[in-house]
Image (cartoon, rainbow, N blue to C red):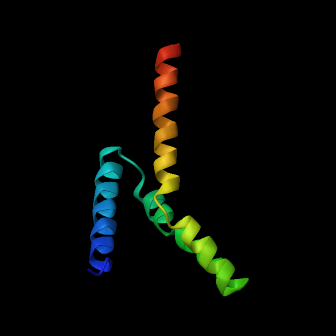
Amino acid sequence: MNPRPLLHLEGAAVLILSVFAYHWSDGNWGLFALLFVVPDLSMIGYLANVRAGAAIYNAIHTYVGPCQGKIEMSYSQQSRNVLF
């Protein structure tokens, strides 16, 4: 089985959920647009060479960073609620 359709479906689901979550949190849509293209700035790594560019691009285009940030935010909010 070709994994490409599954990866596209996963990306579409993440995009849709992200848009709904951002809308629900009453975020600034200009900031959303800016943050939407920020990971593509990692393509600048290709100016060094193809190997470095691919490594930088793949490191930035993961779900690990956003998921880790959400976990850390949740943990800090729980800690704040316990302290106060």
Q: Which residue: 73% across, 83% down?
A: 48
Tell which of 24 and 51 is nearer to you. Answer: 51
Q: Which residue: 58% across, 73% down?
A: 57
The extreme right residue here reads: 48
How many circles with numbers are drawn on the protein?
A: 0
Tell me residue 63's x, y (percent).
46, 58
The extreme top residue here reads: 84
Tell me residue 74's x, y (percent).
45, 34
Tell me residue 37's x, y (percent).
49, 69
Q: Which residue: 53% across, 54% down?
A: 65
Residue 38 image-quadrant placement: bottom right
Tell which of 50 and 15 is nearer to you. Answer: 50
Tell which of 60 and 51 is nearer to you. Answer: 51
Q: Which residue: 55% across, 71% down?
A: 58
Q: Is residue 43 left or right of residue 14?
A: right
Q: Is residue 47 left or right of residue 36?
A: right
Say if 16 sits above or below 23 in the image. Answer: below
Q: Is residue 32 left or right of residue 8?
A: right
Residue 59 image-quadrant placement: bottom right
Q: Is residue 52 left or right of residue 15?
A: right
Look at the image and tell me in which quarter the N terminus lies.
bottom left
The extreme front residue here reads: 1
Tell which of 62 and 37 is nearer to you. Answer: 62
Tell me residue 3's x, y (percent).
31, 76
